[in-house]
């Protein structure tokens, strides 16, 4: 397949490299990143997308996606699919899909989970919104870049699934960290805490697969000084997207809101930027009770 790949940063580069290694003809465009192995460079966006059957974008945010889509769509071939794998707001995903549809193209929003490791290993999970026909067309590419693709519904459904998942993840990580910090103060050994919770009703992915306590549970960023993994500022981005969507949909999200406030404080006022999002544990363990919360 002839593929254009726009945005070749931490995630996009390994994804594009895997597509090229699988035998697809991949043209890349990114004004600020080196070309991955096997990917032919295009200096201009329009040049990259011309003649491509699928255009994949992996960009920082919704504003950049909208700008790239506005420039790419007029240059794309009739019948081609625009597949955005970035994490962006639901409104931008739907706006881009509408713009593509008006130009006779199909669009998918297909954000991922699995991080940089999953992108390199080709084991991402894709959560996809958009028409059946477009999903069927891009599915073989999802199979190369990932291990699972779930077709969640129409335009925006992939982004909706992503932010709901990450709102659960952010809140669960915080409460797992605060429980470890409480356990410390109660004199409960962290390993014993893991042994009980990981096999009891408090278990979760945060506890069982990504334990925030160093030396406990499977290897995780906690075991390498909280080097990300999944950086706290990316969790903050996703929590803010969840709150933005909740605002627009009039959904009450009290715990998601609190999780966003805590990650905002951690990233913007403390030392959280550049640390894994599980570094909430040393932050909480170092503190006493916040009396302002009663
Ligand atoms: P990144 O900043 O490393 O890469 C983004 C790339 O987009 C950069 O190389 C940048 O130069 C390029 N870019 C910006 N404007 C462009 C334009 N107009 N045309 C072409 N390229 C342009 O970010 P990343 O970590 O690769 O993340 C990409 C997306 O994936 C984000 O939406 C992020 O939220 C999401 N995501 C990241 C992770 C992760 O662990 N890093 C995990 C899941 C999802």
Image (cartoon, rainbow, N blue to C red):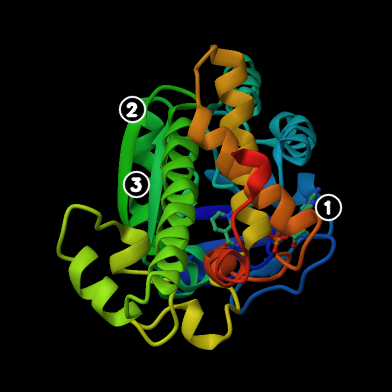
Can the viewer see residue 187?
Answer: yes
Query: In the image, residue 160 lies at what x, y percent?
Result: 47, 31
Image vertical order of residue 270 relative to residue 64, above or below: below
Mark 1: C-beta under 8 Å from nearest atom of ligand 1? no
- The residue under the point 41% across, 33% down is 134
What residue is pinned by disc 2?
132
Nearer to us in this view, 161 or 258: 258
What element does badge 1 sit on?
Answer: loop
Q: Is residue 21 left or right of residue 69?
A: left
- Which quadrant of the structure image shows residue 92? top right
Query: In the image, residue 243 lies at what x, y percent?
Result: 60, 29
Query: In the image, residue 4 lies at what x, y percent?
Result: 62, 53
The numbered mark at residue 139 is 3
Mark 3 vs mark 1, foreground winner is 3
Can the viewer see residue 58?
Answer: no
What element does badge 2 sit on?
Answer: helix
Near mark 1 (Cα within 10 A), the count class, few <14, some 14-19 or many ≥20, is few
What residue is pinned by disc 1?
44
Mark 1 and mark 2 lie on one chain; the one further toward the N terminus is: 1
Near mark 3 (Cα within 10 A), the count class, few <14, some 14-19 or many ≥20, is some
| Callout 2 touching callout 3 (CB < 8 Å) | no
Figure quarter occupied by ligand 1: bottom right
Query: In the image, residue 87 lies at what x, y percent?
Result: 59, 44
The numbered mark at residue 23 is none
- The residue under the point 32% across, 47% down is 149
- The residue under the point 36% across, 66% down is 123
- The residue under the point 32% across, 69% down is 209
Nearer to us in this view, 103 or 121: 121
Mark 2 and mark 3 lie on one chain; the one further toward the N terminus is: 2
Image vertical order of residue 286 relative to residue 246, above or below: below
- Which quadrant of the structure image shows residue 127? top left
In 3D space, how far apart are the residues under numbered discs 2 and 3 (Cα atoms)? 10 Å
């Amino acid at each position: 397949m002839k593929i254009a790949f726009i945005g070749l940063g931490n995630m996009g580069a390994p994804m594009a490299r895997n597509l090229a290694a699988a035998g697809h003809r991949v043209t890349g465009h990114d004004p600020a990143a080196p070309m991955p192995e096997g990917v032919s460079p295009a200096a201009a966006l329009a040049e990259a997308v011309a003649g491509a059957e699928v255009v994949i974008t992996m960009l920082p945010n919704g504003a950049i996606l909208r700008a790239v889509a506005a420039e790419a769509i007029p240059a794309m071939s009739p019948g081609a699919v625009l597949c955005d794998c970035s994490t962006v707001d639901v409104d931008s995903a739907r706006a881009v899909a509408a713009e593509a549809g008006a130009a006779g193209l199909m669009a998918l929003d297909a954000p991922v989970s699995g991080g940089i490791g999953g992108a390199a290993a080709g084991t991402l999970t894709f959560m996809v919104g958009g028409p059946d026909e477009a999903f069927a067309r891009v599915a073989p590419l999802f199979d190369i870049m990932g291990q699972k693709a779930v077709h969640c519904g129409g335009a925006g459904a992939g982004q909706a699934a992503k932010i709901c998942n990450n709102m659960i993840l952010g809140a669960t990580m915080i409460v797992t960290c605060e429980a470890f910090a409480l356990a410390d103060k109660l004199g409960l050994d962290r390993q014993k805490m893991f042994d009980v919770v990981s096999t009891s009703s408090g278990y979760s992915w945060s506890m069982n697969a990504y334990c925030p306590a160093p030396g406990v549970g499977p290897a995780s960023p906690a075991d390498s000084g909280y080097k990300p993994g999944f950086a706290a500022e990316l969790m903050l981005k996703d929590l803010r997207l969840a709150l933005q969507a909740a605002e627009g949909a009039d959904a009450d999200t009290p715990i998601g809101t609190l999780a966003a406030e805590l990650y905002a404080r951690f990233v913007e006022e403390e030392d959280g930027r550049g640390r894994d999002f599980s570094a909430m544990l040393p932050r909480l363990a170092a503190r006493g009770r916040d009396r302002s919360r009663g």
